[in-house]
Image (cartoon, rainbow, N blue to C red):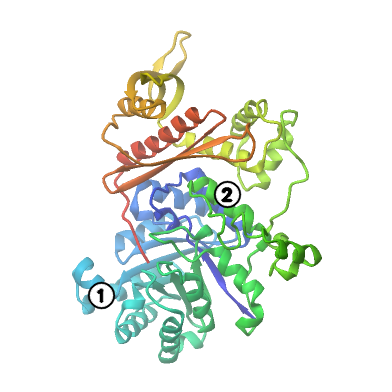
């Protein structure tokens, strides 16, 4: 029996999805859900990137008890020290150091030669090994690296204390056959792999749509550590999706040989996927393998007849295998706080009493307008609350004047949580700031007013969409906006039964993320 170590990098590489920015509380909820799902290693972030990333890794390391918590570092002493600080209280810490090894990266990005790359690998792997028992080394852009030099780089890392060697297909360039050959050669010429002293791992991107196939090929070649993200989040076209890899190994165990298995509790997959989709603001495509809404939907009459007779005629796995089951308790306006809190916990959110109180109040407000509250509605409420914890500005009031023969005008009042004043009752409270602005329509006018308050008039709106979260005329509307500031993208989300209000909340959520990013040094972007 071969156990495959699943390393989830949703909190690190997944957060590099354009427009995705997880707050600390959001990272904690995702990490705890990953742990509950049985993920072996959680790559929590890049501590040296920013104070916020350092604190997020530190908090995840303190909360997670069973999974290994890993921090990423470049081959520099300062990055390694940052990881050591952030992971100081982890029950099972691991450092992941990396350096590019392909000639194109060495010449055009790092401006060093191969000899200098080997010197840095030796020096920093040894330093990392003096601080950590588990040291993972990655040769960035390994699949475009000269094969002989890749052997030298890997051997150098092993000689200086690396216990896991990771071979990334950084730009999604390789093919399954080629990847198999690369890994087989490493195993053939470096005895440490077959001797069991060092674990072989892979990290595959999906630029050619081959990430899952390349991971499976790597496992066939002897890789026992595979990196992936929930819903395939990540740079450009993303990473290998965890749900695809895990279920491919579960469903086609017969084809993998030697009893390959993972420790993932597959019935937790759906809840985890939906949590990450909700908190990231990146919806899952309906036809996405495993977790898409159409994955177990049959439209053809022939297919429907077959499924009615025996589900295995057109389903190679059961919905229950991935936790796709209906809740037997429906929540509505008569539901109590206890039932609501229990559902929140089932969905993977770790709210304290204050959080439950705040979200339950919002739940009751919406329940007065809807007959039945679905899990998707609840996720929207919870995500909206978590987003509000990270933000400087909060919507107080808005008024819209609009018509087919008049210019739209919006009057918006925001509470500024960073500017406190004494109220009429003597209590300290956020300062209220009001601005009016015209626009081509009510949404544009409201966005312009918010931009004036936040000093964000030059922010560019890249995309704006609104959709019904559930069916029916009483459905919650969810607005998603993307704004750009230079090369940075920020995604905002807002929900309400009023689509104008949902739009304002979404734009304000994105503005808050932009405003917070201005306060700290821009994080270094990493790719493996």
Q: Is residue 135 above or below residue 347?
A: below
Residue 29: % across, % down: 56, 48
Q: Residues within 10 Å of mark 1 (few under 14, many from 20)?
A: some
Q: In the shown orientation, is residue 444 left or right of residue 289?
A: left
Check if mark 1's residue and mark 2's residue have beta carbons within 8 Å.
no
Residue 222 seen: yes
Q: Residues within 10 Å of mark 2 (few under 14, many from 20)?
A: many
Circle number at residue 117: 1
* The one of 90 and 457 positioned closer to us in this rendering: 457
Examine the image and state in which quarter residue 3 appears.
bottom right
Q: Earlier in the sequence, mark 1 or mark 2?
A: 1
- Say what secondary structure mark 2 lies in: helix
- Gap between marks 1 and 2 measured at Cα: 40 Å
Q: In the shown orientation, is residue 449 left or right of residue 224?
A: left
Which of label 1 and label 2 is nearer to you? 2
Residue 65 seen: no
Q: Is residue 164 above or below residue 191?
A: above
Residue 191: % across, % down: 45, 90
Examine the image and state in which quarter residue 157 appears.
bottom left
Picture residue at 40% right of the left edge, 50% below the top: 53
Picture residue at 63% right of the left edge, 40% below the top: 471
Picture residue at 36% right of the left edge, 80% below the top: 154
Q: Quadrant of the C terminus?
A: bottom left
Question: Which residue is tagged 2?
Answer: 275
* The one of 464 and 53 positioned closer to us in this rendering: 464
């Amino acid at each position: 029996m071969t156990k495959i170590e699943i390393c989830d990098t949703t909190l690190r590489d997944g957060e590099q999805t354009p427009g995705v920015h997880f707050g600390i509380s959001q990272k904690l909820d995702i990490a705890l859900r990953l742990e509950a799902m049985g993920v072996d290693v959680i790559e929590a972030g890049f501590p040296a990137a920013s104070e916020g990333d350092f604190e997020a890794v530190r908090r995840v390391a303190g909360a997670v008890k069973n999974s290994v918590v890993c921090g990423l570092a470049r081959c520099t002493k300062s990055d390694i020290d940052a990881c050591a600080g952030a992971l100081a209280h982890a029950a099972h810490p691991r450092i992941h150091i990396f350096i590019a090894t392909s000639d194109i990266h060495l010449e055009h990005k790092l401006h060093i030669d191969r000899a200098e790359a080997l010197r840095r690998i030796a020096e920093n792997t040894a330093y990392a090994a003096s601080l950590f028992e588990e040291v993972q080394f990655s040769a960035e852009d390994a699949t475009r690296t000269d094969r002989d030099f890749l052997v030298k780089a890997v051997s150098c890392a092993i000689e200086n204390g690396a216990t896991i060697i990771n071979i990334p297909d950084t730009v999604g360039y390789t093919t399954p056959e080629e990847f198999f050959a690369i890994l087989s050669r490493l195993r053939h010429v470096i005895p440490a792999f077959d001797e069991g002293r060092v674990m072989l791992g892979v990290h595959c991107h999906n630029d050619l749509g081959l990430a899952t196939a390349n991971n499976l090929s790597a496992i066939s070649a002897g890789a026992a550590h595979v990196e992936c993200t929930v819903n395939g989040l990540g740079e450009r076209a993303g990473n290998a999706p965890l749900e695809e890899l895990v279920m491919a190994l579960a469903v086609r165990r017969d084809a993998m040989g030697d009893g390959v298995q993972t420790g993932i509790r597959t019935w937790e997959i759906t809840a985890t996927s939906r949590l990450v989709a909700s908190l990231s603001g990146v919806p899952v495509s309906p036809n996405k393998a495993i977790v898409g809404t159409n994955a177990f939907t049959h439209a053809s009459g022939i297919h429907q007849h077959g499924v009615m007779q025996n589900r295995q005629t057109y389903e190679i796995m059961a919905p229950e295998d991935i936790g796709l089951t209906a809740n037997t308790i429906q929540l509505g306006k008569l539901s109590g706080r206890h039932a609501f809190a229990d559902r929140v916990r089932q969905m993977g959110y770790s709210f304290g009493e204050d959080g439950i109180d705040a979200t339950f109040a919002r739940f009751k407000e919406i329940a007065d307008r809807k007959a039945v509250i679905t899990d998707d509605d609840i996720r929207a409420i919870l995500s909206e609350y978590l987003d509000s914890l990270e933000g400087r500005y909060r919507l107080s009031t808005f008024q819209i004047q609009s018509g087919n023969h008049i210019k739209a005008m919006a009057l918006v009042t925001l509470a500024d949580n960073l500017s406190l004043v004494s109220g009429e009752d003597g209590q300290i409270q956020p300062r209220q700031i009001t601005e009016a602005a015209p626009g081509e329509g009510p949404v544009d006018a409201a966005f312009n007013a918010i931009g004036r308050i936040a000093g964000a008039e030059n922010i560019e709106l890249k995309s704006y969409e609104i959709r019904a979260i559930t069916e029916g005329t009483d459905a919650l509307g969810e607005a998603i906006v993307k704004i750009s500031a230079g090369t940075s993208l920020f995604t905002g989300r807002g929900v309400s039964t009023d689509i104008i209000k949902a739009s304002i909340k979404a734009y304000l959520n994105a503005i808050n993320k932009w405003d917070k990013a201005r306060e700290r040094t821009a994080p270094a972007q990493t790719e493996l």
